[in-house]
Image (cartoon, rainbow, N blue to C red):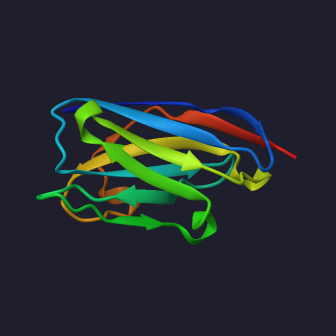
């Protein structure tokens, strides 16, 4: 079992920045692929960013088109933590942000492919 706890959400003005963290505990390892997803009120959960697990020293990342150039996903395996740095935030980025994990060396995008989920952290961007 893997437990995930997100933090770092809050209220920020448009154009501002936030850094989300996802701390993993339990049966964690660098071989878990990690992802960030978000769900706005009344909408389905959608993919934001993902980083592969590693069977070596190389990681791969992928981003949804609407965050490319603004968000950066990274991981610190020594701390069992994945980050989502969010810059140039827009009101439409307002949502609950979730991190997820699955045992994989690849970048994993589909929501349904993830095994473990955190409880989410609210991000609100005011105009």
For this rendering, which residue is in front, 78 or 36?
78
Q: Is residue 104 left or right of residue 13?
A: left
Residue 43, by quadrant, is bottom right
Q: In this view, does 64 lie to the left or right of 22?
A: right
Residue pictured at 49% horizontal, 59% vertical: 47
For this rendering, which residue is in front, 78 or 42?
78
Residue, far left: 55
Q: Position of residue 126 (x, y in %)?
A: 83, 42
Q: How many marks?
A: 0
Q: Vertically, is 29 above or below 88?
A: above
Q: Vertically, is 98 above or below 62?
A: above
Residue pictured at 81% horizontal, 48% vertical: 14
Residue pictured at 61% horizontal, 33% vertical: 9
Q: Vertically, is 78 above or below 106?
A: above
For this rendering, which residue is in front, 47 or 62?
62
Q: Position of residue 92 (x, y in %)?
A: 75, 55
Residue, far bottom: 65
Residue pictured at 39% horizontal, 50% vertical: 74
Q: In which quarter of the image is the N terminus?
A: top left
Q: Where is residue 82 in the image (x, y as percent from the top left)?
A: 38, 42
Q: Is residue 19 left or right of residue 89?
A: left
Q: Vertically, is 34 above or below 122?
A: below
């Amino acid at each position: 079992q893997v437990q995930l706890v997100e933090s770092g959400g809050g209220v920020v003005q448009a154009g501002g920045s936030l850094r989300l963290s996802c701390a993993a505990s339990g049966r964690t390892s660098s071989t878990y692929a990690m992802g960030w997803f978000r769900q706005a009120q009344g909408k389905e959960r959608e993919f934001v960013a993902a980083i592969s697990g590693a069977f070596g020293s190389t990681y791969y990342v992928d981003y949804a088109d609407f965050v490319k150039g603004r968000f950066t996903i990274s991981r610190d395996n020594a701390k069992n933590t994945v980050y989502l740095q969010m810059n140039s935030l827009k009101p439409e980025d307002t949502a609950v942000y979730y991190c997820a994990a699955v045992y994989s060396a690849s970048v994993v995008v589909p929501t349904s492919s993830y095994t473990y989920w955190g409880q989410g952290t609210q991000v609100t961007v005011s105009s």
